Image (spheres, rainbow, N blue to C red):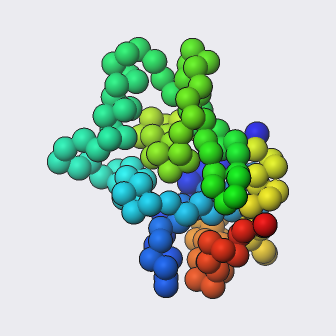
């Protein structure tokens, strides 16, 4: 399993379908996952530290986990079938629950939980970002994301269909 960071959520044109970008930690691949508008909002709120006036479903679930005395130990993106990603929530007592990646990522951001992806999925669906430089340099990282966004402006979900 490779750890990945949530780079951001972006609405792609002309389809206007949101996409979440995961970046391989210590690597140069990005994993694009097309998601629903509600999940994109939930992820964006968590990334920006925004607290809605009333808790969202992901906030409720995070609080429920905490109140029950457990913690989410990791999120794993474990499968890709016909363009559909699958994730697993792994709890501190080793309980595993199947979930959508978008919900899993929204929950991970709220709980400070690391997100992992299998090497096979990164090899199959990961997109290398050319000419990357030092990850520690924030300016370079922003340039990488901008190059990737330019690439995404030209692709559609069908471009990733391997069938």
Picture layout, residue 74 above or below residue 43 = above
- Does residue 95 appear anywhere in the picture? yes
Query: Which of the image's four quarters has the C terminus?
Result: bottom right
Q: In this view, does 5 lie to the left or right of 18?
A: right
Query: Which of the image's four quarters has the N terminus?
Result: top right
Q: In this view, does 125 lie to the left or right of 32?
A: right
- Does residue 135 appear anywhere in the picture? no
* Residue 155 found in image quarter: bottom right
- Residue 142 coordinates in the image, percent (x, y): 58, 71
Number of numbered discs present? Answer: 0
The residue under the point 55% across, 29% down is 97
* Residue 146 found in image quarter: bottom right
Picture layout, residue 112 above or below residue 85 = above
- Residue 48 coordinates in the image, percent (x, y): 37, 56
Picture layout, residue 107 above or below residue 48 = above
Q: Nearer the viewer, residue 50 or 142?
A: 50
Q: Which of 59 and 24 is in front in this view?
A: 59
The residue under the point 53% across, 39% down is 99
- Residue 151 coordinates in the image, percent (x, y): 66, 80
The residue under the point 76% across, 54% down is 122
The residue under the point 62% across, 72% down is 157
- Residue 52 coordinates in the image, percent (x, y): 23, 50
């Amino acid at each position: 399993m490779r750890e990945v960071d949530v780079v951001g959520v972006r609405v792609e044109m002309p389809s206007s379908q949101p996409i979440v970008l995961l970046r391989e930690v210590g690597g140069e691949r990005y994993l694009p996952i097309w998601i629903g508008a509600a999940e994109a909002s939930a992820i964006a709120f968590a990334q920006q530290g925004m607290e809605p006036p009333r808790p969202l479903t992901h906030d409720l679930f995070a609080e429920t986990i905490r109140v029950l005395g457990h913690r989410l130990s990791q999120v794993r993106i474990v499968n890709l079938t016909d363009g559909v990603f699958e994730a697993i929530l792994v709890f501190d007592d080793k309980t595993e629950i199947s979930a959508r990646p978008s919900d899993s990522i929204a929950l991970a951001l709220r709980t400070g939980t690391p997100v992992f992806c299998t090497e096979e999925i990164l090899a199959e669906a990961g997109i290398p970002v050319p000419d990357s430089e030092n990850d520690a340099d924030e300016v370079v990282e922003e340039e990488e994301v901008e190059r990737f966004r330019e690439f995404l402006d030209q692709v559609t979900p069908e471009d990733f269909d391997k069938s």
